[in-house]
């Protein structure tokens, strides 16, 4: 690994130098173990602790198949799917690995759905990428053997999320990816900054901007739940960058200030204003929906949201359906507060509203989202960086929502701040790049 790191940090190493490096037989990785799958049985979600289940192990380097690439991982990041894997909810991800079979079905699962690093090897048939290329990876793993996915790879019946539904993810010193997951690293960013947008940036792009999701246009009013969080912070940037007006819902004054620093003006601190959408575990409170809708109209000058960027799920979904404008869209991609949604269908059907499902992004959407980052139009929302040994704590903090934006993890990178090549572009955007770091 030290030889690999030296080559990456060298100013003059080229493809043949990386091709000459020996690939280690094993590497450090963050894993969950199949024998621990029942360790949290009977506990409520809140009490399940990723620090107990996520472990650092030395694992065997997998064989490289056609169409695959082996990447030396300089940095990765935490997403909520790693939290789900670590607490074995809503199901154990070992079920995914068993169905996938082959080299992926092991008694351990190497987690992580983001990375920034350098290609070490490519398998047969890979022609676009070569050893030494500096890359980031999006997390769509798709073989495209079926016709269903050829218009939109997210519709492929064999589509999987890498590092969640497959093995050998990015929270490790090496990672195995399909070549069509790779994208150029934004060269004005450090390794940890470049690793952080991947999953959430691409997800927000499809959900809000793409024709497969919200199909946002200039002038739209967009209600964004969790607007300073991992997904919401990118949605807020896309809305502002695309000529829409975000209405940012947050849960604290600090998070409200983050949204203001991005340029958002319309902000609802739901904790300060005391919204309680549920009377109890089984019954929602439509009066609170109406109060919330009135507050949105007060901020927007009487307009209801054209698009609701919905991801909390159970807790907020009834309110989201209610407040969307007539003919508007509720675009949903996750359910971090619970996936059994309830809403009053009268407000949907009689007002011709649409519920649109959105899940991650296809390669084209991920590429476009990454291109906007590389051009300095959309910025990473990295707030804190952990070492690989601290991954359990990082996932715990995300589980408890004790973070802003995204949290990164250093893998092979020995320290923060490395990997920048385009210093001019970085200098022009340094305040935006560091926006979440100073929060």
Image (cartoon, rainbow, N blue to C red):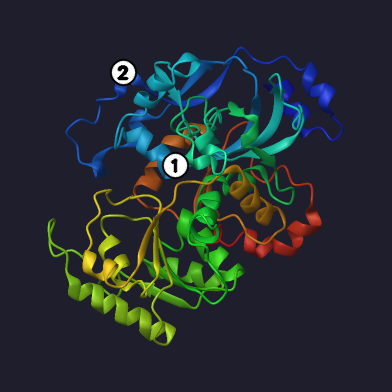
Work out whether 370 lies above or below 288. above
Give percent across and percent down for residue 141: 53, 33
Q: Residue furthest right?
A: 12
Image check: 363 left or right of 281? right
Q: Quadrant of residue 93?
A: top left
Comes first in the chain, label 2 or label 1: 2
Q: Residue furthest front?
A: 147
Mark 1 lies on residue: 394
Image quadrant occupied by the N terminus: top right
- Distance, label 2 to label 1, CA atoms, is 22 Å
Give percent across and percent down for residue 340: 24, 49
Observer-nearest residue: 361 or 104? 361
Work out whether 369 lies above or below 8. below
- Residue found at x 75% / y 32%: 128
Which numbered circle lies on residue 226? Answer: none
Mark 2 lies on residue: 35
Observer-nearest residue: 197 or 162? 162
- Residue found at x 39% / y 86%: 302
- Residue found at x 25% / y 42%: 45
Image check: 345 left or right of 92? left
Judged from the image, the secondary structure of the residue bearing numbered disc 1 is: helix
Work out whether 113 lies above or below 279. above
Q: Quadrant of residue 373?
A: bottom right
Give percent across and percent down for residue 429: 70, 62
Q: Quadrant of residue 254?
A: bottom left
Q: Is residue 74 visible?
A: yes
Judged from the image, the secondary structure of the residue bearing numbered disc 2 is: helix
- Residue found at x 48% / y 14%: 102
């Amino acid at each position: 690994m030290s030889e690999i790191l030296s080559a990456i940090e060298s100013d003059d190493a080229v493809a043949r130098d990386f091709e000459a490096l020996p690939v280690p037989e094993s590497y450090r990785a963050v894993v969950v173990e199949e024998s621990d799958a029942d360790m949290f049985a009977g506990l409520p979600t809140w009490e399940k602790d990723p620090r107990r289940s996520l472990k650092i192990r030395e694992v065997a380097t997998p064989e490289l198949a056609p169409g695959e690439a082996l990447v030396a991982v300089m940095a990765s990041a935490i997403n909520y799917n790693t939290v789900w894997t670590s607490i074995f909810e809503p199901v154990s991800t070992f079920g995914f690995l068993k169905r996938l079979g082959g080299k992926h079905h092991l008694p351990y699962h190497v987690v992580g759905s983001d990375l920034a690093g350098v290609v070490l090897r490519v398998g047969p048939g890979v022609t676009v990428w070569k050893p030494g290329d500096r890359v980031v990876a999006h997390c769509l793993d798709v073989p495209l053997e079926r016709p269903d996915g050829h218009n939109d790879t997210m519709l492929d019946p064999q589509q999987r999320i890498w590092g969640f539904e497959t093995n050998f993810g990015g929270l490790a010193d090496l990672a195995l990816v399909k070549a069509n997951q790779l994208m150029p690293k934004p060269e004005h960013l450090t390794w940890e900054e470049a690793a952080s947008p991947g999953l959430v940036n691409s997800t927000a792009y499809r959900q809000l901007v793409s024709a497969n999701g919200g199909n946002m246009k200039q002038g739209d009013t967009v209600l964004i739940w969790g607007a300073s969080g991992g997904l919401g912070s990118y949605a807020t940037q896309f809305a502002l960058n695309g000529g829409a007006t975000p209405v940012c819902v947050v849960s604290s004054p600090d998070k409200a200030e983050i949204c203001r620093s991005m340029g958002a003006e319309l902000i609802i601190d739901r904790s300060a204003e005391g919204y309680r959408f549920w009377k109890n575990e089984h019954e929602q409170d439509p009066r609170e929906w109406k109060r919330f809708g009135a507050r949105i109209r007060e901020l927007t000058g009487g307009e209801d949201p054209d698009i609701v960027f919905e991801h909390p799920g159970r807790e907020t979904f009834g309110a989201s359906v209610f407040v969307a404008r007539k003919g508007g869209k509720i675009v949903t991609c996750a359910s971090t507060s619970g996936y059994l949604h309830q809403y009053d269908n009268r407000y949907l059907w009689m007002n011709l509203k649409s519920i649109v499902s959105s899940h991650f992004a296809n390669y084209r959407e991920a590429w476009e989202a990454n291109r906007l980052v590389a051009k300095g139009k959309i910025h990473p929302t990295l707030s804190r960086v952990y070492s690989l040994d601290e991954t359990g704590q990082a996932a715990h903090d995300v589980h408890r929502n004790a973070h802003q934006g995204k949290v990164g993890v250093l893998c092979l990178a020995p320290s923060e701040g490395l990997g920048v090549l385009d210093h001019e572009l970085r200098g022009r955007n340094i305040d935006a790049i560091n926006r979440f770091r100073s929060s």
